Image (cartoon, rainbow, N blue to C red):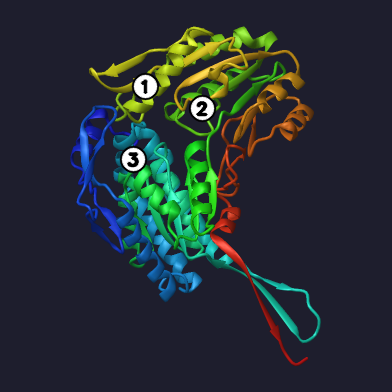
Amino acid sequence: MLDYTHEDWKARAAALNIKGQAFIDGKFVDAASGKTFDCINPATDAVLAQVAEGDEADINRAVAAGRAAFEDGRWSRMAPGDRKAVLLKLADLIRANLEEMALLDSLDMGKLVTDAATVDAPGSAHFFQWYAEAIDKIYDEVAPTGPGDLALVSRVPLGVVGAVTPWNFPLDMATWKGAAALAAGNSVVLKPAEQSPLSALRLAELAAEAGVPDGVFNVVPGFGVTAGKALGLHMDVDCLAFTGSTAIGKMFMQYSGQSNLKQVWPETGGKSPNLVFADCEDLDTAADMAAFGIFFNQGEVCSANSRLYVERSIKDAFVEKLIARAEAMQPGDPLDPTSKMGAIVDEKQTQGIMRFVEEGKKSANLVTGGERVTVDGKGCFVQPTIFDDVAHDNPLARDEIFGPVLSVIPFDTEDEAVAMANDSIYGLAASVWTDNLSRACRVSDKLMVGTVSVNTVDALSAQTPFGGMKQSGFGRDLSLHSLEKYTALKTTWIKYKA
């Protein structure tokens, strides 16, 4: 795939057999209402598919299927080694269909197909494999007791897990939730973002092919106000994992209180700071990664380093480096391997980004970008945009824009940089650039975020938890820690004759 041309990718995209029905109880089905909605390619404005518009009735069907599967033990009580084998096969199937999975995400939400083929789709396979391998390597506990008592402490699956995932990494976010929940022995009902449901539907089909039993992994596309709300309020959903905006995360917390007090694990918004100190010896790499940290995936990343704090003595030179990198990353057709940025997910998001940009032009120094553009006269594209000398209280530096817009803010002292970085309602991630080890440790300790990346940006792996603090939520994806939210601790106390 790495040697595919633009024409190669377009030909393969044209040959796709896209399925838009919901996947419930092991088969594709229409929405109970018969309604559908258009799935639109944001790069071309073309309709990709008619997708089932699931609502409360469809959520009810999916939850019932998940509950039946859980109760009869077809998955929840399957031997760990057998469950592992099924998820390993699913990982292999994702790899075997890598090209298709990459194309579905690229066409659906506008990301570069090269990124989807080298990052997203391989990542999905990797995470399924990682959690599969963990299944038969996690042990329960025996508590210390006196003679005649045996106290067993075990982690058990919760039952039916609801998952609501965002549109920016459709396949990967479905995987982050689904792989861990399935590995723990739960049934899953996934509601993907209405802007990008296609790869999740194909994932469900591959899961069935791998041997995931009917009813265990269900996907119901639809809108948040109907399908998403129904999942959040459902009395028979035991846990809900959510990635998306802070406002919607708060709504799911309310839905829990209004229904059955289900566990809710939100991973929500971010406005991640990137601190560059003058004692960073490799400013070229720092500039490369600062550009990557905000312009990768068109800036549609919850942990994007959208606030750049640069020590004043190097600020002007550093900004010049950034401008050169931004101007080399102009958007293009996501299926063109030479493109450096893709399309914004839809018209609504594009207009929202441009409102911030237009207001920013009145209050900050626009040094590059700042325009909406088209490719071949079509699509939702925004130039990589940098504002310099942004006031710390400017909305550019406070609000989550979720687009390719960077705010540069100078600082004079370490304490000032840390104070500004922490002065946010969000606490998802941060980056620190310095060659002073003491400073790296000191600043990292003070930053109130879920992940601090030192001399890199947005570091993550299957081995480390991902999530935030404050209004970035408290859910954790990835690592063995994520299994904790999909399981409950059960104590079994046995009296015996000593």
When asked about the image quadrant of residue 456, the answer is: top right
Q: Residue at x 44, y 45 (%)?
A: 173
| Residue 31 horizontal/vertical position (percent) | 24, 53
Task: Quickly name the residue at label 3.
Answer: 196
Residue 311 numbered tag:
none
Q: Earlier in the sequence, mark 3 or mark 2?
A: 3
Task: Quickly name the residue at label 1.
Answer: 351
Q: Are marks 3 and 2 in contact (CB under 8 Å)?
A: no
Q: Residue at x 77, y 87 (%)?
A: 148
| Residue 288 horizontal/vertical position (percent) | 54, 21
| 96 sits to left or right of 135 | left
Q: Amino acid at mark 1?
A: Gln
Q: CA distance from mark 1 to mark 3?
A: 18 Å
Where 435 falls versus 264 (above or below)?
Answer: above
Q: Are marks 1 and 3 in contact (CB under 8 Å)?
A: no
Residue 400 numbered tag:
2
